[in-house]
Amino acid sequence: MSKRDFYDILGVSKSASAEEIKKAYRKLAIKFHPDKNPGDKEAEEKFKEAAEAYDVLSNPDKKQRYDQFGHAGMGGAGGYGGGHGFSMDDIFSQFGDIFGDGDVFGSFFGGGGRGGSRRSVGSNIRIKLKLTLPEMKTGVEKKVKYRRMVEAEGVKYGTCKQCNGQGTVRRVTNTFLGQMATSSPCPVCNGLGKMIESKPKDANDQGLISQEVETTIKIPGGVADGMQLSLNGKGNAGPGGGAAGDLIVLVEGVEHDELTRDGNNVIYHLWLSFPQAALGDSVEVPTLDGKARIKIDAGTQPGKVLRLKGKGFPDINGYGTGDQLIVVNIFVPNKLNSEEKATMEKLLDAENFKPNDKEKSFFDRMKDFFS
């Protein structure tokens, strides 16, 4: 089942501002919140769907990739409620930014909050992945090793004494309208509600250590050089058991010995001898799938482009497949032996080896064009 467009989910246009996107998500989050719709699976799915859309469209990097490549640009690795490693806690962790005051959202649903503490999010990791043209055409699974920060074994936490584990501190100020209460993340535990009591020596102040990990990256067919894929939750772990950041994979194309890429098309320069072009021939050319034999018609002219339909790259958004374009070039030898020279001299005055008026006109125009 194909996923819905994120802009349609939130009901905003592609030109919507960050504030408009935030406002649209806030409205949907209130409407489909599980506490407001107990036992309603459809409302829960819409709640998760809206959260996923906001997660992408509120992040400039993710939004740029989504606008350029659609759902394929997310690497098939992200999404709430889709079995990709996100939980309801991840969604509720957004509410500190969306609703501000930790008690504001709870007031909509009679205080049915999920706790004042918040989960911090780890930083993203960026790696480069080299792919050959055939791999970029068909798609491929690659195992990669990289280092990421993970929580060290043996880290022990205790309740933050400043906020008593709530993650927020409440302040009451007097105004001309009366007393106003506001909540903000605890400055001591950074909103986690807990503090590290003990940790291994090799762990940093956040209880994290560097570890080499291996993961499998599924590359979709049609990716291009410079494209970025995102694997959610494969980046550095967040402090205090927080959600991990993303692994950003930058695709680097490896040059092919004979083929070049032009959008979704593949270009190959075929060199023919003069007799092959004049008499016609059957030749073998390389493609991304192996070798292919093509027919050269008699009288083929230099610069002619032959087409192998469907031998290019699939469009990343599913809009068809490109072709392989074969550009014909005629090889002129630098040296001739006496026999070859004699043969060519006999052809100098042959009528079929002289351009006709139409061809002369063409060559004259080309000469004027390049002069």
Image: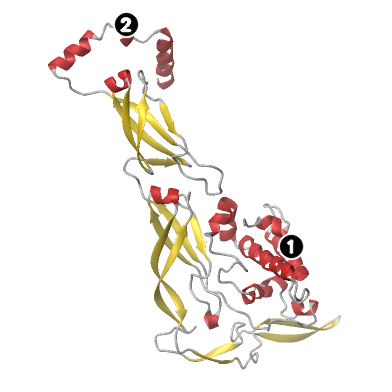
Depth check, front residue: 323 or 212: 323
Give percent across and percent down for residue 306: 42, 29
Q: In which quadrant of the rendered view does residue 241 lie? A: bottom right
Residue beneath label 2, please? 351
Residue 2 appears left or right of 345: right
Q: Which residue is drawn at 75% across and 72% down?
A: 40
Q: In the displayed orientation, state which residue is furthest to the right.
A: 177
Q: Which residue is drawn at 54% across and 83% down?
A: 240
Q: Which amino acid does label 2 sit on?
A: Glu
Q: In which quadrant of the rendered view does residue 193 lie? A: bottom right
Residue beneath label 1, please? 24
> Vertically, is 261 above or below 111?
above
Give percent across and percent down for residue 135: 40, 51
Q: In the displayed orientation, state which residue is furthest to the left.
A: 338
Depth check, front residue: 15 or 36: 36
> Do we see residue 225 in this rendering?
no
Q: What residue type is labelled 1?
A: Ala
Give percent across and percent down for residue 44: 71, 70
> Vertically, is 113 above or below 362?
below
Mark 1 / mark 2, whichever is N-terminal: 1
Quarter of the picture holding the N terminus: bottom right
Q: Residue at x 69, y 64 (%)?
A: 50
Depth check, front residue: 166 or 2: 2
Residue 279 appears left or right of 366: left
How many other residues sit within 10 Å of disc 2, few (<14), some (14-19) or many (≥20)?
few
Residue 227 appears left or right of 351: right
- Dot 1 falls on a residue whose secondary structure is helix
Nearer to us: label 1 or label 2? 2
